[in-house]
Image (cartoon, helix red, strand yellow):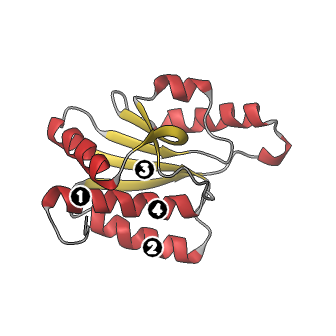
Amino acid sequence: MRIRTLSIGKTNVEYVRQGLEEFNSRISKYCKYEWDEIPDVKNRAKLPKNDLKVEEAKLILKRLVPNERLILLDEGGRNLSSVKFASWLSDAVNLQAKDVCFVIGGAYGFSQELYDRSEMKISLSPMTFNHQLIRLIFAEQLYRGFTIIRGEPYHHG
């Protein structure tokens, strides 16, 4: 099974990029893992919000693999503790039937087409974070999930 994370836009904050490199390296010890950045939509500042979400969806959908489980990181998603996320992740890994693709969208969220195509939405917090920082938060939680599954001491829950 392979796990991927797609994110809209380039990671342009240096400490976030460094943190992603560190956590992505750690995650790769547990599974086939990759982080894929999708370039921003051209002329995005001139587009209405809904049009921008539709254009971003087109870019995301082009990158999806058939039968890949699409999980959206979305403020309206399910709130899972780190332990519950690890349990979900363990089930996903043990099924090994489908690859998993987590998606971090743009500033305005996702188009209806992506919501319809997704298997699940996960909220990382009731708080709002910028789209640079949420990348690092998610990478850390994915790593934490694997350490919980393996019973490693990283998580002190």
Res 62 label = none
Q: Can you identify the residue that label 4 sits on?
A: 137
Position above or below: 80 against 55: below
Name the foreground residue: 153 vs 68.
153
Name the foreground residue: 62 vs 53.
53
Give the percent coordinates (x, y) of residue 117. Answer: 47, 25
Label whose residue precedes the other's in the sequence (3 or 4) = 3
Say what amino acid the circle numbered 1 marks.
Phe
Position above or below: 6 against 78: below
Label whose residue precedes the other's in the sequence (2 or 1) = 2
Is residue 139 among the parts visible in the rendering?
Answer: yes
Name the residue: 20% across, 32% down. Answer: 97
Position above or below: 21 against 109: below
Q: Can you identify the residue that label 2 sits on?
A: 19
Q: Can you identify the residue that label 3 sits on?
A: 5
Name the foreground residue: 33 vs 81.
81
